[in-house]
Amino acid sequence: MCVEISIPFMRIWRIRYTLLVAILIFGLVNAPTSAFAAVKSGSACKVLGQISVQGSTSFQCTKSGKKLIWAVKPEVKPIQTALGSPIAMKAFAEMQKAIAAMGTSAAPKITTIPSPSTDPKLEKEIQGNLLFASEYFKNYLPQSQPISVWIIGSPLDLKWNATSWRIAIPYQAENLITRSDAFSAEVGYATDGALAMVITSPDQLTTFHEFTHAVQDMLAQGKAGLPCWVREGMAEYESNAMMGRNSEVAYKAAMLNLIDELSMISFSLFKYRSAGLDYWVNYFANDETRNNGECRKNSSALDAAYSVGGLGFQYLQGQYGRDKVFEFIKNIGQDWKGVCPSANDKMIACKSWKISFKKSFGVEPAVAYKAMGAFIVNQIEWSTTVKSMSESDIIAQFPESRSIPKYEPLAKVEVAGAPCLTNGETAGSLKCVNKDNFFFWSASGNGGGQNNSGSKTPVQIDDLGAPAGVPAPGRTCPNVGDKARYEKTPLMCVKGSGNTGTWMIDNNPAN
C-alpha cells in the first residue's frame, strides 16, 4: 500500500530556510574570519579557538583573564640551531669526536707512485692529505691494508702512467688513460692486493672524497653493492665534513656548499629551494634503480646523487651516529647475496643492501627516506636564513682549518706499478719487468693482465655454489690479471693471500 504525504509549500520553504540559517551560523562560528572585519591583536572575539587569517598573519581567539581576545597565532617551526636542525648539530659533534681521537702516529701501508715530472713538494702535500684521511678513518680502515696511490705530476707523463696502470690495474687502465689529465679516483684493487687510487692535485676535498671510497671498497668488498646516493653521498658528506673539521663556522660553510650543489640536479633552472618533501623521498627511491655508471658529477641530472646523498648521510650520522653508518657499509659486504641480474646486466645495486640498512638503522630505507627528505627540506630553509663565509675568509679567520699535522715521510716500498731498476730482479712476489721501455714491478711477472676498457672494480664474494673445477668468485686462480666468466658474471684474477690469486667479480665502474 502506498501512502502519499502532502506537505504544504510554505512549510517546505520554512524547513529549507531554517536549515540554511543553521548552516550559515555554523560556518560563521567555525570558519576563519578573513572575509569579515579586520582583526587585530588584543581586540575582542567571541568564539574561543576561532582562527582568523589577515594577510600573511593568523590570529586565534584566546582567553585572557575573563575576556576573549584575538592573539597572533604562533607559527610552529622546527627547532633550529646554528647548523640548522638539531640533527645537523649532532652530526657535527660526531665528526668532532673523530677529529679529537686522531693522532699523528698513523702508519698505514700507503705507497705513493709519483710520475717522473711530479714536484716533490706536491708529493709531500698529497702524502699529508692521505695520512690525515687514513688517521681520520682508522677505526674502519685497517692500517695493515696496503694502498697504492698514483700521483700524476704532468700530462706529459701519460705514457709512463699508462704503462704502470696496465701492469698494476689492467682492468682500469684504458679508462684511466682517457681521463688522466683532469681527475682523481679510487679505482678498486691492484693486482698485488693494494687498494688503488689516482690523485692529480693537492686539493684536500677531492682526496678526502676518494679516500672515503677506498674505505667503502674495503668494507663493502667492492662498491657494486652501493646505490649512487650511498656511494657518492657518503663520500661527499665525509669530505665536506672533514673540510669543516676545526670550527663550527667552517663546518657550516661546508654544509652550505653541499646544499648549493643541489643546483646541479639538472642543467635547467631547477628550483630546489621550493621542492617539497615528496620530491626528495621520490629522489631517493628512484636512485635505487639507477645505473652505477651514471653516478658521476657533471653528467646531467644524476649529479644530485652527490649532494642529496651527502645531506642524507649528514642525517644518518646525526640521527644514528658515525659508527652505525660504517657498520652499515661493512654489513653490505657481509650480507650481499651475490650476483643479481640487475648487477650483471645494468650495473644496478642488488637489493640486499637494504637488509644491511635495516640491520644497522632499525628501519627500512623507504621509512628513512621520509625522515631524510624532511631533514633536507629543513636544511634548505635554514640555508636561506644564514650567510656563509668564503674560503679566503675561513682561512684568514681560522688558519688551522686547512692545516695538516706533520707526519713522517712515507717510505718507498716495492708495489705493483712502481718503478724498478733491473729487468728480472724480484722483491717478494713481485718481479721487475720491462714494458714499453719502462721498468715496473709486476705481480704477475709478465707485464700485467689483459687490458679492459670496461673499467670495472673486482669484488670478492663466495663461489655462489658453482660446480667444482670452474672459475667462480672467491676461488683460487693461477695467473693474476687473467679474465674468465662464471655464467654471465665477468671475473678477474687478483692477487690473494700468499702466492695465489683469487677470482673476483668485475662489476663496478670507476668514479
Image (tube, rainbow, N blue to C red):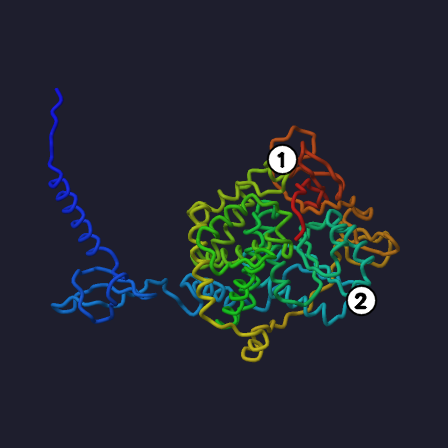
- On residue 463, the disc is 1
Whole-percent x, y for residue 150 in the image = 73, 59
Q: Secondary structure at mark 2?
A: loop
Q: Amino acid type of disc 2?
A: Ser
Q: Secondary structure at mark 1?
A: loop
Whole-percent x, y for residue 172 in the image = 73, 49
What is the C-alpha distance between the residues marked 2 and 1?
A: 44 Å
Q: Amino acid type of disc 1?
A: Asp
Q: Is residue 379 above or below residue 452?
A: below
Q: Quadrant of residue 481?
A: top right
Q: Quadrant of residue 501?
A: top right
- On residue 117, the disc is 2
Return the residue nearer the eye: 432 or 149.
149
Are discs 2 and 1 less than 8 Å apart at CB?
no
Quadrant into which the N terminus falls: top left
Left or right of 64 on screen, residue 500: right
Residue at x 19% of width, y 56% of height? 29
Q: Residue furthest bottom?
A: 396
Return the residue nearer the eye: 211 or 88.
88
